[in-house]
Amino acid sequence: MIYWELFVEFLRVGLFSFGGGHAALPFLYNISEFKQWYTIQQLTDMIAMGSVVPGAFGVNVAAFAGFSTAGVFGALIAVTALIAPSFIIAVAISGVLVKFKKNAYVIAIINVLKPVSCGLLAAVGAQIFVDSVNNLFGALLLGILLLIYFYRKRTPVFVLGVSAIAGLAAGLLQLI
Amino acid sequence: MFNKRGLFCHAKPAPAKRTMFRIFLTFARIGLMLFGGGNVVLPVAQKQLEGLVKPKQLCEFYAVARSLPGIVAPNFAALAGYKLGRLPGALAAVLGLVLPPVALIVLLAAGFDSIIYLKFVQSIFWGIGIGVVMLIFMGVQDIWETSVEDRFSFILFFAAFVMLAGFRVPPSAIVMMAIMFAVAMQMKSEEGAK
């Protein structure tokens, strides 16, 4: 049953994604590859939507992925399964927060997981790069975005706004 | 007759149901103020929860929320909500944080399917696809700055990258391996210290 599969997959995301922000993306990418519930192209659109809508990015993208897979109920199941594991852990440890934070094993695990989740995210970025930057104009646009970014850091909404306008212009001028 | 004292007494013990609803609303407001990812949850919450939870304690919640699995903002809401109203408080806080954005996403996603076939919308999303590459690059750089500091952490970064990009190892397996590796290392260093 699709709802059960969805629940199990997103439970896995909730249990194993560390590092906040974009940490859930490698898992969502993995789902798109092995389950074929949505394509990489769709995942890219989800990431864009998830960054523009307010709220926690990971939750937003998961809601979108759940919706694409199995409608409104799918979105609710995906979000519930995503949040449930860490919710239970958070409530369980809330009496011993300081002890938890200073535990040598917790610190050791976090220190290893940080660069690992960075590497996982870079792998997803490489995959979406291959998928999205499919012509010269795309490469040029990415180059311009990088230049702007190194000149001054910008918000995701700014980046997506510029690229949306560039895409529209490229479409009208039949460059793509 | 209402006197000052009577009013005061009436106002103080708030009924539990109402408190939960207030927690829900407060976190709904926090959720809708999170732009550009959940990482801004700390300053937003410090402002919205002023007088309810000490800023320093919120900092601590944030640090713990980051070291738990899952998404940081709901983890944070669970911890802060628990502090405000135990288990029901934690539930109210997480639901409040999550539900409004999810409702927005569902509405957008439902509308998305009916416009994506338009030619100019496809052009826009072609551009946005490039923007997303940029966003992920920014995300990688963000984590990189605080995590890849020496040769050891660079090797971990590179190993994870190759395993996922080159060999399609499921991320959950990679993370599990990393956890076991960290535990083994810690056990060894504790043995060495004895």
Image (cartoon, rainbow, N blue to C red):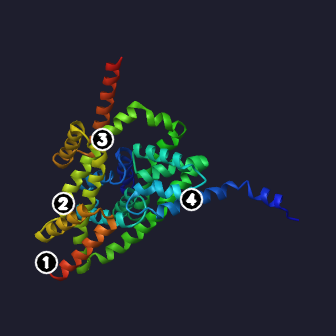
The residue type indicated by label 1 comes to: Leu
Q: Position of residue A83 (x, y in %)?
A: 44, 51
Helix, strand or loop under label 3: helix
Q: Position of residue B145 (x, y in %)?
A: 29, 48
Measured in 3D between alpha carbons, the distance from the residue under mark 3 to the one under mark 4, in whole angstroms, is: 33 Å
The answer for which chain carries disc 1 is A
State yes or no: discs 1 and 4 in contact (Cβ < 8 Å).
no
The answer for which chain carries disc 3 is B
- A138 to B90, vertically: above or below: below
- B6 to A168, vertically: above or below: above
Measured in 3D between alpha carbons, the distance from the residue under mark 4 to the one under mark 2, in whole angstroms, is: 39 Å
Q: Which residue is mark 3?
A: B175
Q: Reading the chain from its start, which is encountered first: label 1 or label 2?
A: 2
Is A175 left or right of A2, judged from the image as shown? left
Q: Reading the chain from its start, which is encountered first: label 3 or label 4?
A: 4
The answer for which chain carries disc 4 is B
The answer for which chain carries disc 2 is A
Measured in 3D between alpha carbons, the distance from the residue under mark 2 to the one under mark 3, in whole angstroms, is: 23 Å
Residue at image coords 13%, 77%: A175
Residue at the far bottom: name it. A172
The residue type indicated by label 4 comes to: Phe
Q: Nearer the viewer, mark 2 or mark 3?
A: 2
The residue type indicated by label 2 comes to: Phe
Q: In front: B166, or A149? A: A149
Q: Which residue is mark 1?
A: A175
State yes or no: discs 3 and 4 in contact (Cβ < 8 Å).
no
In which quadrant will I find the N terminus of chain A? bottom left
Q: Residues within 10 Å of mark 2 (few under 14, many from 20)?
A: many
Measured in 3D between alpha carbons, the distance from the residue under mark 1 to the one under mark 2, in whole angstroms, is: 19 Å
Q: Position of residue A8 (x, y in %)?
A: 37, 49
Q: Which residue is mark 2?
A: A129
